[in-house]
Image (spheres, helix red, strand yellow):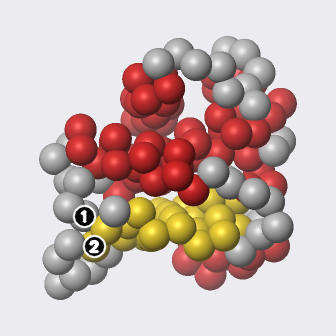
Amino acid sequence: MLEITNKTKQKINRKTTDALAEYVLKFYHQEAQEVSLVVIGDKKMHSLNYEFRGFDKTTDVLSFPAAKNAPGFLGEIFVNIQEAARTSKYREMFGELKTPTYIFYFLAVHGLLHLLGYDDKTEKGRRAMIILGSKFLSGFFHKKVL
């Protein structure tokens, strides 16, 4: 189950976002797990990135796994909706220009993958997560153009 908190004025499709998260969690047999998704902007993301990672800049997505003593709760994901709108930044990653909506969903899936144990600290891990995230979106949307 996905709990969505949107702290921006940007509209998101809650039903689709929830269904996408369920799709990914079901694949990993984690559909009973709860996840919190918080949609924020640059300023709040900058603050979180500095506070928790020591980076004095904004970023696109942060994931915080739940404590081991919180059964049933996988963790919390923060997605920067303003970063998702910077589509040209992601052109190299995907090999083509994607819409802000696609990038938002990709970042949500990317955050989920982190909560499920994936890591992108190495180039190999980063590429694997990009490929996996893209495959989840493709499977979920059945190659539908966003």
For label 2, the SS is: strand
Mark 1 → mark 2, Cα distance in angstroms: 5 Å
Q: Amino acid at mark 1?
A: Gln
Residue 19 lies, in percent from the top left, at 43, 46
> Does residue 103 appear anywhere in the picture?
yes
- Which residue is located at x 56 percent, y 39 percent? 106
Residue 25 lies, in percent from the top left, at 29, 48
- Which residue is located at x 75 percent, y 39 percent? 100
At label 1, counting other C-alpha atoms closer than 10 Å, the crowd grade (few under 14, some 14-19, many 20 or more) is some
Which residue is disc 2 drawn over? 73
Is 118 located above or below residue 140 in the figure? below
Residue 14 lies, in percent from the top left, at 57, 56
Is 12 located above or below residue 53 in the figure? above
Q: Which of the image's four quarters has the N terminus?
A: bottom left
Q: Is residue 58 left or right of residue 134?
A: right
Q: Amino acid at mark 2?
A: Phe
For the residue pair 16 and 33, the one nearer the viewer reads as 16
> Does residue 128 appear anywhere in the picture?
no
Q: Which quarter of the picture shows residue 36?
A: bottom left
- Check whether the beta carbons of the residues at disc 1 and disc 2 lie within 8 A of each other: yes
Which residue is disc 1 drawn over? 33
At label 2, counting other C-alpha atoms closer than 10 Å, the crowd grade (few under 14, some 14-19, many 20 or more) is some
- Which residue is located at x 80 percent, y 60 percent? 10
For the residue pair 56 and 140, the one nearer the viewer reads as 140
Q: Which mark is residue 110?
A: none
